Image (tube, rainbow, N blue to C red):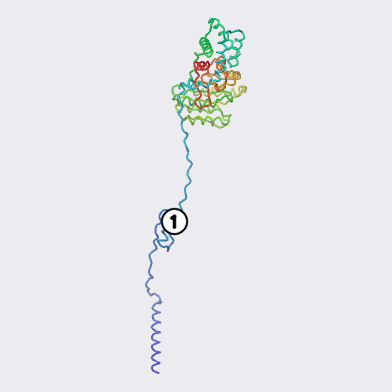
Amino acid sequence: MEAYLGIIAIVVVVALLAAGGVFLLFRPGGKTAPPPVEPPEVLPIPKEGEQAPPRGATDDDAATTTLPPPPVKPAEPVVVAPVIEVPPPSAGRMVRLRARLARSQSTLGKGLLDLLSRDRLDDDTWDEIEETLITADVGVAPTRAMVEELRTRVKVLGSRSPEEVRGLLKEELLTQLGVDLDRTLHVKPHGERPAVVLVVGVNGTGKTTTTGKLARSLIGDGNKVVLGAADTFRAAAADQLQTWGDRVGAEVVRGPEGGDPASIAFDAVAKGIEDKVDVVIVDTAGRLHTKTGLMDELGKVKRVIEKKATVDEVLLVLDATTGQNGMRQARVFAEVVDVTGIALTKLDGTAKGGIIISVQRELGVPVKLVGLGEGPDDLAPFDAEVFVDTLLGD
């Protein structure tokens, strides 16, 4: 019995001790040790092209995890500046291009030489000579003058060797072409004011192309040029002239389609003065010579330009293949503006080289430029001696 009571007493003491410990642990105001604070996890800094590993990942995981390549920024369009060409000088161009006159030679030059070299020059032969000249677009009045002069000189000579016939014909052709005419293109600036060239002509004669080729020629001779795109009625004219200007580094002044041509011409001259250029070339609309209102507008363009500078040259562009129809056009233009020179295009594509004689005789102004091909440098200063020698096969 006593032993049993002793065991109960021991259990009670242990229970009381246990209860006291719990009380000490949870009693208010009791101080307990804070739980240990673990240091923050330090993640490795990812290298370029790698992805940061997730928390808890091992080093091996970080080493094998990579990012996709960064997005490639789209490349901006590259603007390529046009290549500025250096045109050749104008001197000697007609000599280099003389082979282009082969078609004119076959009819006008060789035909006349064959006829004049016959043993007997009767009336029928002289009629053939006259017909050859008229067919070559020399014109009726110049033809009659040439035939009369040739008949007189042949009678004086008596017998005729091939060399004498050729020399005789060369002299007569040079006389009709006007070897003493001033064919100088007046493009010298006046102090601080540039020279101004006004280019006129009907549709289809190659006027805008001639303007661009003339700019190349002048730049090849060392001049600084501004182009005025005053042909606002043909949609592609300004773009065409811009292309010519870009190729040789010439500034192009242009306006809206259908805009006032006189205003654009004025602005082009003003730009030329501002930039201190040597020459301003103004391309005008290809007006039909039958349209009185349009022709009057051409006169207005010239008058407006003259408020800023002198118009040194008015070049009338004619198509050599149009023959006597070109003469009618030339007469009307000469009534509206004072034409100072002729630019005769497509001379290489016709057997009617005599148009040079008739147009000069009709207008009283010289042919200053001739187009002898479609290349950019096929516009040449006209040389009467080279032209006649080529016609006669020298």
**Circle 1: residue type:** Thr
Dot 1 corresponds to which residue? 66
Q: Nearer the viewer, residue 354 or 225?
A: 354
Viewer-closest of 260 and 121: 121
Q: Position of residue 327 (x, y in %)?
A: 59, 18
- Residue 334, above or below 38: above
Total number of numbered discs in the rendering: 1
Outermost residue on the front side: it is: 119
Rendered view: 180 above or below 219 = above
The residue nearer to you, when weighing 308 against 218, is 218
Q: Residue 339 placed where, x, y %?
A: 54, 19
User: 310 above or below 238?
Assistant: above
Please give left or right for residue 2 compared with residue 202 in the image: left
Q: Is residue 394 above or below residue 38?
A: above
**Split into 4 quadrants, where in the image is the N terminus?**
bottom left
- Callout 1: few (<14), some (14-19), or many (20+) C-alpha neighbours within 10 Å? some
SS of the residue under disc 1? loop
Q: Position of residue 135 (x, y in %)?
A: 60, 16
Residue 389 pos. (x, y %): 50, 16
Specify the quadrant of the image occupied by residue 102.
Answer: top right
Residue positioned 50% across, 13% down in the render: 179
